[in-house]
Image: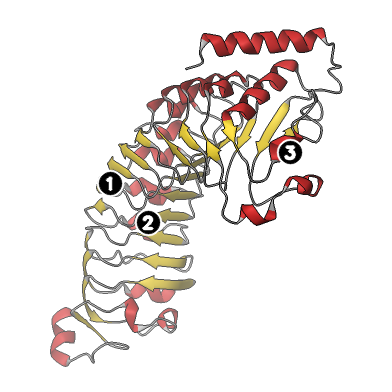
Amino acid sequence: MCGARVLLTMSLLVVTLEFLSVSPVESCPPSEWAALMSFKAALNEPYFGIFHSWRGTNCCYNWYGISCDPTTRRVAEITLNGLTVGDNHRRYRRTKTVESGYMTGHISPSICNLTQLSSITISEWKGISGNIPECITTLSFLQIIDLSGNYISGKIPYEIGRLTQLTMLNLAENHISGKIPNTLINLFNLMQLDLRNNALEGPIPGNIGKLKKLNRALLSHNRINGRIPRSFSNIYGLADLDLSLNRLSGPIPFSLGQMSVLDSLNLKYNNLTGRIPKTLLASRLSHLDLSRNALRGPIPDVFSETSYFINLDLSFNHLNGLIPKSMALALYIGHTDFSHNHLFGRIPAVPSFSHLQQASFEHNQRLCGKLLKPCTDDLIHIHE
């Protein structure tokens, strides 16, 4: 919540700057200068001393980590990345203390007066703590929010969907909890969504397919439960979908295998059940990881001359039946893992398996052939 006292202080600062008649051609808008001053006051960063460069009224000139749009002179980006101290600011670096240092502080409600800010990038510091204030959702010009790799806790603001200009939302590697807000589906310009390595729970919004411009959805290593929404398949340009290391259950939607752009699908370490959809193995996927679930039934025998799998991992499930002979037709089969299932019969002697090791097939008690135990006539006749 943005308090009345903060708003009054900000208003007085803006009026003071306007009275000084700072040229709009040479300086960022007074409201943005005042907002950045509040942003500076909310954080503690004693190791690099980068905020020492935040002097004067022109936040578009030589303020470390600040970039402005060259045409509008609006603040376009805040980049406080601890690994990229610029040449112009090396005098502020404290080499001896940085090795053990970290950024501390919290995200103050005063951030919420950055009304023209179009990018916040505060990554790789490994030290910012506190909650994301609800009023960050009033920053209607935001295009990028990157708060990854910190100690931010609390919930994703429910009104996050008000930021309709947002193209990237990166809150990965924090301690954020609660549910993914249903309002997220209003971010119709969103292209990258990264919520990995948090403590999020509850279901994925069922109508997430309304994010038509999304090309990466990375939600792994949380506590997300429920079913995989079928609406994911409505996102034409989605190329990378990672839902691994969660608590998802139910069947895998067959429509995921009908997505023409999807290249990587990672569903490992969930509680998924049912059969592997034929569409997945007949798709254009090059990375498919379904390991460590509770999938049953045979591996669909649908490989073809267009099959190109750099990584195919079906291990640690309850799959049975023969290894598909159609895998001999595949254009390329890279890393493959069928281990820890209930497969049986002879391992096909096909060129695409020539590089594989015993570990790719082991712990299938009735599987035989190259790399494993010899096939007996009785075993072959029973299963083939």
Observer-nearest of 368 and 381: 368
Report the amino acid beneath label 1. Leu
- In front: label 1 or label 2: 1
Q: Residue at x 57, y 14 (%)?
A: 6
Report whether 174 appears left or right of 247: right
**Earlier along the polypeptide chain: callout 3 or callout 2?**
3
Whole-angstrom CA distance, mark 3 to mark 2, is 47 Å
Residue at disc 2, secondary structure: helix
Report the amino acid beneath label 3. Tyr
Observer-nearest of 132 and 320: 132
Q: Is residue 338 above or below residue 198?
A: below
Report whether 359 appears left or right of 89: left
Q: Is residue 209 above or below residue 384?
A: above
What residue is pinned by disc 1? 248
Q: Which mark is residue 280?
A: 2
User: Tags 1 and 2 in contact by the CB under 8 Å rule?
Assistant: no
User: Tags 1 and 3 in contact by the CB under 8 Å rule?
Assistant: no
**Earlier along the polypeptide chain: callout 1 or callout 3?**
3
Q: Is residue 179 visible?
A: yes
Q: Residue at x 24, y 74 (%)?
A: 322
What residue is pinned by disc 3? 64
Report the amino acid beneath label 2. Leu
Q: Position of residue 202 (x, y in %)?
A: 29, 36
